Image (cartoon, grey):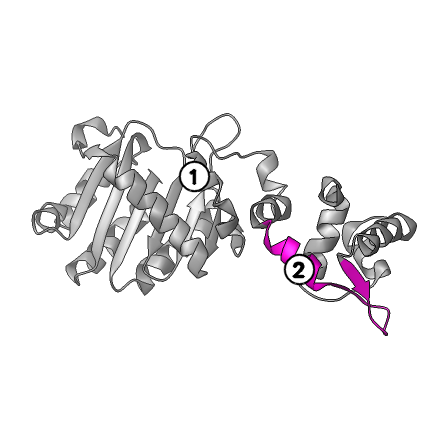
């Protein structure tokens, strides 16, 4: 019942980061002090939080243990604004059950910021670059080709509805993707439809979820170097990779 209240959940999440006072939490939440105080008292009564000698509240061992059992709820709660317009699409249940692995992240909004992150992932990669591509920006073709020529493994999954910009064919010919593919440095596969995108190297990863109307969206994403976050993205990529079909260039349309 304590977690049925969004405000009490937010209090617990805030106190899991650092100790705090009622007045400070009330200001953070944009709520009145009496309202927040009542919820603090309820959490104290439940044994989830306590107050120290400096009148700062903190999570008890019980409170922290309970908090650590709800990372999925915490991930959605901390990004509730994003999930007002996005959902998990066709994500298999086993990955939804593990969605709390994405809790430690940095949120990026805007195509420019997303592209900056993608370019950094490419630049920092030394072993592999894996991507489930909702779009294939022209700016990424050259740096990916250069990495492949240095021996970095490139694996990409395209949707038949992947947005392909004009000029792509000329660029992949210019940077000799045919030879890179022939030598096994670049491998591509295809799925009928893709709504969830991931882009990762051996050290960092990002994930993008679809909008509520089912449209792919690379304008907003979650990024992290956290081990659990990376493992989730890698596992999901491999799941999609082994369930994908052979790549067919003629199915892509500019």
The magenta-colored residue range is: 49-70
Quick one: 28 or 104, which is closer to the camera?
A: 104
Task: Identify the residue under disc 1.
Answer: 94
Q: Dot 1: within a 10 Å radius of its alpha carbon, few (fewer than 14), some, or many (20 or more) residues?
A: few
55, above or below 166, in the image: below
Label pair 1/2, CB-CB below 8 angstroms: no
Determine the CA span between mark 1 and mark 2.
25 Å
Query: Residue 38: where, in percent of width, then height?
Result: 88, 49
Residue at the location (35% across, 32% down)?
A: 194
Quick one: 65 or 223, which is closer to the camera?
A: 65
Quick one: 250 or 170, which is closer to the camera?
A: 250
What is the quadrant of residue 208 in the picture? top left
Task: Identify the residue under disc 2.
Answer: 64
Residue at the location (79% across, 57% down)?
A: 25
4, above or below 222, in the image: above
Q: Dot 2: within a 10 Å radius of its alpha carbon, few (fewer than 14), some, or many (20 or more) residues?
A: some
Q: Mark on residue 187?
A: none
């Amino acid at each position: 019942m304590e977690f049925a209240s969004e405000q009490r959940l937010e209090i617990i999440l805030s106190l899991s980061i650092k100790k705090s006072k009622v007045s400070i939490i009330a200001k953070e939440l944009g709520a009145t002090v009496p309202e927040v105080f009542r919820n603090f008292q309820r959490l104290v009564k439940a044994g989830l939080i306590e107050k120290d000698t400096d009148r700062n509240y903190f999570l008890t061992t019980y409170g922290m243990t309970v908090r650590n059992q709800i990372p999925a709820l915490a991930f959605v709660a901390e990004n509730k604004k994003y999930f007002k317009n996005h959902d998990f699409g066709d994500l298999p249940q086993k990955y939804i059950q593990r969605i709390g692995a994405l809790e430690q992240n940095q949120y990026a909004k805007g195509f420019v910021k997303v592209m900056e992150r993608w370019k950094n992932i490419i630049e920092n990669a030394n072993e592999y670059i894996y991507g489930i591509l909702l779009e294939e920006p022209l700016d990424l073709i050259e740096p990916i080709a250069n990495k492949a020529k240095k021996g970095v493994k490139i694996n990409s999954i395209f949707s038949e509805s992947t947005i392909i910009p004009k000029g792509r064919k000329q660029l992949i010919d210019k940077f000799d993707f045919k030879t890179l593919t022939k030598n096994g440095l670049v491998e591509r596969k295809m799925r009928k439809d893709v709504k969830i995108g991931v882009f990762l190297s051996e050290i960092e990863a990002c994930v993008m979820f679809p909008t509520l109307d089912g449209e792919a969206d690379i304008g907003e994403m979650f990024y992290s170097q956290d081990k659990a976050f990376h493992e989730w993205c890698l596992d999901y990529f491999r799941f999609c990779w082994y369930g994908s079909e052979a790549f067919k260039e003629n199915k892509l349309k500019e």
